[in-house]
Image (tube, rainbow, N blue to C red):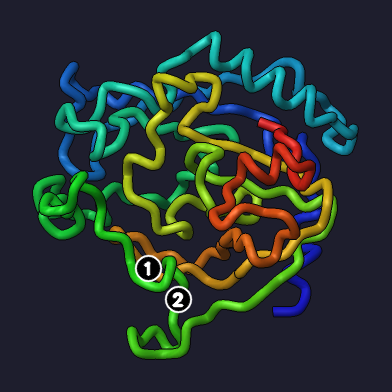
């Protein structure tokens, strides 16, 4: 566990947002249908001029990175947006990035773990819930020792130091974060976590990136496999008990509003 705490502090905004990928031409039909993970892909990448430099060691500012990312949105606002597989948003975007920073995040991701959309939905979608939603793993998604469901939960308190870069696929109203740049399949998230939200088109693939301004504690540990994804990444869960003056239920937005985090993208 030692060494985790400072591991992402050496990352700069440039290394995280040097290039933003555009969605590939997958050949999907207008209804977004494709067969499992095998939509044909023609790669297309968009290089952000504001971040391209022959000298990769030149430092970039978070503001420059964010501005360049917003420029990419103006070029192709449909990245990770509709059409959706089989026309259902829950099944995720038919067009996934294959190059650039976002391409690196989804590299190795196999849609539905090779199951058909119908098989995947049957296994993981809870239609009896109100509202209907995904069947998430227990224990906040933390892995268990030995991989056994009755093993010890691998969860411990950890301090995230100032300067750390964190991210999440999801709105600022969530409670989970990860080390910036973690591969999507190691996060073990459902496929609609990649959907660019119509109400927030500035964040491609529903991706948000933050920098720690004030050190704070979280519950941390490895992620259990879920949704046909391998997991194994590291997750940080916000705990109000660790944050002086926090409400009983705390989220990322609260951390931003109270100066713990600053928004990079």
Q: Can you give x and y, in whole percent of width and height, for residue 182 in the image?
A: 57, 53
When the figure is inspected, residue 61 is found, relative to residue 77, above or below; the finding is below
- Judged from the image, the secondary structure of the residue bearing numbered disc 1 is loop
Check whether the beta carbons of the residues at disc 1 and disc 2 lie within 8 A of each other: yes
Q: Which of 256 and 185 is in front in this view?
A: 256
* Residue at 71 percent of width and 60 percent of height: 243
Is 57 drawn above or below residue 31 in the view shown? below
Taking 19 as reference, is 124 left or right? Answer: left
Measuring from the top left, give residue 59's x and y in whole percent: 89, 34
Nearer the viewer's eye, disc 1 or disc 2?
2
Image-quadrant location for residue 78: top left
- Left or right of 120, for residue 100: right
Residue at image location 61% in from the left, 69% down from the top? 219
Q: Where is residue 218 in the image (x, y as percent from the top left)?
A: 66, 65
Q: Which residue is drawn at 70% across and 39% down?
A: 256
Q: Is mark 2 on a helix, strand or loop?
A: loop
Q: How many numbered markers are drawn?
A: 2
Q: In the rendered view, does 202 fall on the left or right side of 50? A: left
Label 1 Cα neighbours within 10 Å, binned few <14 / some 14-19 / many ≥20: many
Disc assigned to residue 143:
2
Q: Is tag 1's residue or tag 2's residue first in the polypeptide sequence?
A: 2
Residue furthest to the top: 74
- Crowdedness of circle 2 by 10 Å Cα count: few (<14), some, many (20+)? many
Quadrant of image for the C terminus: top right
C-alpha gap between disc 1 and disc 2: 8 Å
Q: Which residue lies furthest to the right in this view?
A: 58
Residue visible at 18% across and 16% down? 30
Circle 1 sits on which residue?
225
Q: Position of residue 94 (x, y in %)?
A: 28, 30
Horizontal arrangement in the rendering, residue 250 relative to residue 94 (left or right): right
- Image quadrant containing the N terminus: bottom right
Mark sitting on residue 87:
none
């Amino acid at each position: 566990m030692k060494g985790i705490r400072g591991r992402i502090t050496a990352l700069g905004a440039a290394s995280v947002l040097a290039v933003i990928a555009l969605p590939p031409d997958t050949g999907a039909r207008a209804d977004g249908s494709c067969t499992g993970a095998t939509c044909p892909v023609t790669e297309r990448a968009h290089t952000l001029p504001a971040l391209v430099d022959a000298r990769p060691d030149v430092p970039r500012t978070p503001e420059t990175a964010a501005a360049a990312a917003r420029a990419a949105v103006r070029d192709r606002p449909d990245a990770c947006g509709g059409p959706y597989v089989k026309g259902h948003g829950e099944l995720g975007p038919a067009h996934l990035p294959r190059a650039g920073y976002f391409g690196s995040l989804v590299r190795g991701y196999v849609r539905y773990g090779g199951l058909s959309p119908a098989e995947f939905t049957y296994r993981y979608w809870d239609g009896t819930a109100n509202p209907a939603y995904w069947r998430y793993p227990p224990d906040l998604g933390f892995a268990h020792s030995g991989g056994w469901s009755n093993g010890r939960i691998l969860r411990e308190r950890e301090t995230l130091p100032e300067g750390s870069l964190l991210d999440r696929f999801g709105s600022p109203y969530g409670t989970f974060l990860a080390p910036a740049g973690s591969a999507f399949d190691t996060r073990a998230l459902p496929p609609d976590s990649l959907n660019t939200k119509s109400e927030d088109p500035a964040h491609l693939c529903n991706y948000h990136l933050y920098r720690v301004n004030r050190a704070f504690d979280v519950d941390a540990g490895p992620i259990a496999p879920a949704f046909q994804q391998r997991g194994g990444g590291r997750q940080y869960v916000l705990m109000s008990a660790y944050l002086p003056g926090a409400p009983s239920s705390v989220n990322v937005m609260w951390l931003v509003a109270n100066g713990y985090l600053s928004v990079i993208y």
